[in-house]
Image (cartoon, rainbow, N blue to C red):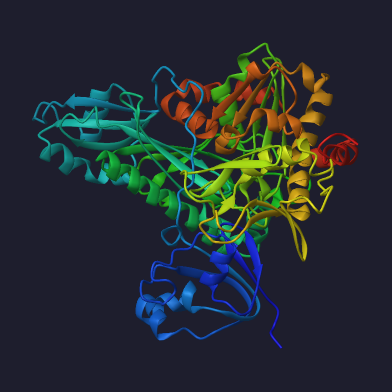
Amino acid sequence: MEEHVTVTFEPEGKTVADSSHTLLELAQGANISLRGECGGTGVCGKCKIKIVKRNGLLNEPTEKEREHLNETGIAEGYRLGCQTKVVSGKCTVYIPPESRTGKRVISGIGLDEEVPLAPAVTKVHLHLARPAFDDTRPDQKRLMDALNENAEIPLHSLARLPETLRKADWDVTVARWKNRVISVGPGDTTKDLFGIAVDIGSSKVICHLVSLESGKTIARAHAENPQIMYGEDVVSRITYASKSPEHLEKLQKLVVDTINSLIETACKKSGISPDRIYEMVFVGNTVMHHLLLGVSPKYIGVAPFIPAVGSLVSFPAKDLGILMNGEGMVTAIPLIEGYIGSDAVANLIITKIYQDDAVSLAIDIGTNSEILLGNSEKILACSAPSGPSFEGAHISSGMKAVTGAIDSVTIEGDCLSYTTIGDVLPKGICGSGVIDLVAELFLANVITKTGKFRDLNHPRIIVDGVPKFVVARNDETSTRSDITVTEKDINEFLLAKGSLKTGWTILSEKYGIDPSQIDKIYLAGSFGTHVDIENAITLSLIPDIDRKHILFAGETAIGGAKMALKSVSERDNLQQLLAKIEYVELSVEPSFNREYLRSIPISPV
């Protein structure tokens, strides 16, 4: 009798039950991206995976695995997917970026991110007077006199100052962060001045390398957030980080290593040396913010959900292990409250809702959706725990928005059509495709408002244990398997949709307006950019207002981070902005349960 086996693949978040196939076969069968150029023979070694958690038994490593991974790699938990089977119990497998196929779609920034250039980092070129018997000032004072200020010099720079000045023949450029000397170097390098903006999302990390001399973005890079192997949602990561200091350190190292890899990629693209990056400004939700700083997020996860730090803070890059100029500074944009982090503040920076008389709604849809409603008088903010279904996870044929994902669906009569990212054969369906599919199934009278199939004799419904609607037949797909959705999949989506709708409904109620009275809607993030507006309104993902006033804002978090990187005045405005924001904790609102139950069906009960 075969043992019961479950395997969870990250970062997809898919769980598969099977004891008779290799991990590569399980991944391929579940439409999960895992390379296997040699067809699973163990020759290429491209299907490297990492066993993150297990409560059971694996087969012993094979000779081919020992050849490709060596004993050190195997000891660290690495295996080849094509050679590994889970014999019994549970196992969580992380697929590293190099072992995946396909590339995630990252939207651009749909709003104007230009600001008058006034960064915290500046450079000044100096010709210092040489020492003489009638001028015996110390090197530090000589430099401060030339700068015409008494700036702080870190010990590292001060220790090297005598040799630096003399080797440069007293012709130097000084880089400063506010009133702190970052570096002193030979010659005129005033145009060689760079910063990096970073958006740390629960599922992805985005970096933009910026010239602080011109204000232009000169390189971009992004990657999956590898912390997802320890939990798709922020609550799971809080739990893991809170178990021990070692766990917290592990999560911090994962995101620091990812940022360093992206900095390296951006620098190679642009030909810039990392030591010419003098400031990093980052944003993220409250938990991602704390994890990068190495601050325990434990008490964010228990009522009354208190962060450890919320104000704008800056630390030397060397303290965090960020591979840029060691004396350069890493600046964290302030948080709001609870689970509403600095990414939401960045949304406000770029949308300028707080300067507008019109009442605007900004929604950043994701695993943890941030919702902001207000104008120049006041702003309400809440967090809606939508779950990972908007990312395609927990949907049987779901996947992230990468090459091969069905991203749009249309049903006209008996004809179903779809498009895929990359215009290739489909291998799954991503969040925007799920929205289209559920809306189209409802409008075509295939499902009820609660997501149940009306007629199991429909030509696209098959009953294989449970009823499934076939979106793409096996002869159309790259995996040679049907891409389907079940009633359970639709229910997962409706629960997430219900959470989002509950958020903006309660904010509207507290603001004293009907949702139809909202003047503008900003849809932020990659997901929001690819949403079909009509289908989103059909499903009540967003309020039904004039379509001309619904704006695709794109990656507002990285856009707002760049604005703060380029302008100290944008940071100075944050205190005034934060004073206008009222945080709403949905879970303690008296109307929460009522509104949530009303919001789950496609049309109100």
What is the x, y in percent for residue 90? 66, 74
Horizontal relation, residue 416 to residue 479: left or right? right
Quadrant in which residue 274 is drawn: top left
What is the x, y in percent for residue 290? 58, 48
Q: In the rendered view, would you say 389 is above or below 559?
A: below
Q: Nearer the viewer, residue 247 or 24?
A: 24
Q: Is residue 584 visible?
A: no
Q: Number of numbered discs present?
A: 0
Quadrant in which residue 122 is drawn: top left
Q: Residue most toward the bottom?
A: 1
Horizontal relation, residue 34 to residue 4: left or right? left
Residue drawn at point x = 62 percent, y = 29 percent: 523
What is the x, y in percent for residue 192? 25, 32
Q: In the rendered view, would you say 120 is above or below 66?
A: above
Q: Residue most toward the top?
A: 357
Horizontal relation, residue 529 to residue 159: left or right? right
Q: Nearer the viewer, residue 525 or 136?
A: 525
Q: Nearer the viewer, residue 50 or 15?
A: 15
Q: Classify the position of the N terminus by image quarter.
A: bottom right
Q: Nearer the viewer, residue 320 or 540?
A: 540
Residue drawn at point x = 67 percent, y = 57 percent: 396
Residue drawn at point x = 61 percent, y = 75 percent: 54
What is the x, y in percent for residue 240? 64, 61
Q: Classify the position of the C terminus by image quarter.
A: top right
Horizontal relation, residue 203 to residue 281: left or right? right
Q: Is residue 181 visible?
A: yes
